[in-house]
Image (spheres, coloured by chain):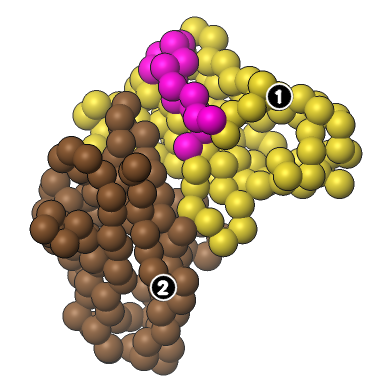
Chain colours: A brown, B yellow
Amino acid sequence: AQRVTQPEKLLSVFKGAPVELKCNYSYSGSPELFWYVQYSRQRLQLLLRHISRESIKGFTADLNKGETSFHLKKPFAQEEDSAMYYCALSGGYNKLIFGAGTRLAVHP
Amino acid sequence: DTGVSQNPRHKITKRGQNVTFRCDPISEHNRLYWYRQTLGQGPEFLTYFQNEAQLEKSRLLSDRFSAERPKGSFSTLEIQRTEQGDSAMYLCASSSPRAGGYTFGSGTRLTVV
């Protein structure tokens, strides 16, 4: 079965601390993985995709096929990073299978 | 705003009534998706259009739900005989092979009372 698991509903850190948002997936085949972010009162938007191997707003994510993980990391969290983060897997016709999301709260 | 537009933003309806939502995708995007999101969950796939053809439907899309995309432009999602369990945020997204990802609309929040 195709599934995305985000084990933490809430991750609370202080400004300047490192952040790691966990994502594990289950998929038979070569997956395409994404991170989407939703800031307060804004629409869901693409943060990064594993294919591009970019760093967006200081965030990076590496696909680990052995551990079936795609964790999102940032070395120094900023208050403006506070948002809802969703990991997603592309499964056929490019439809996305989302995890339940992790709320990141960065405190001053 | 040239993004994905959804109307209405909010809809409150009585149980048993029919409702229809509209999505206007980015004009050059040929793929259009509907998702449903309930509290505390990520978006769940409902259906997918490529141009005007509906190519995939989720098991979540019961026979009370119907979606159309005439002429491959805007799309409508209709829910007949609404139930309280239909209360959710309904999201539309569009993409194209060159887009590199979805663009989501702001969603339509449905409340069935």
Residue drawn at (33%, 80%) of the image: A78
Residue drawn at (28%, 54%) of the image: A25
Residue B70: horizontal and vertical position, in percent? 54, 10
Q: Which residue is mark 2?
A: A8
How crowded pointer 1 is (Cα within 10 Å; few <14, some 14-19, many 20+) is rated as: few
The kind of residue on which mark 1 rests is Arg
**Residue B82, image quadrant:** top right
Q: Which residue is mark 1?
A: B64
What stretch of residues is rendered in magenta?
Answer: B45-59
How crowded pointer 2 is (Cα within 10 Å; few <14, some 14-19, many 20+) is rated as: some
**Residue B26 at least partly seen:** yes
Residue A21: horizontal and vertical position, in percent? 31, 71
Say whether residue B50 is magenta. yes
The chain under label 1 reads B
Q: Is residue B100 left or right of residue B76?
A: left
Residue A92: horizontal and vertical position, in percent? 30, 30
| Element on which disc 1 rests | loop
Say whether residue B6 is magenta. no
Q: Is residue B99 left or right of residue A67?
A: right
The chain under label 2 reads A
**Residue A38 at least partly seen:** no
Q: Is residue B35 left or right of residue B7?
A: left
Query: Foreground: B4 or B107?
Result: B107
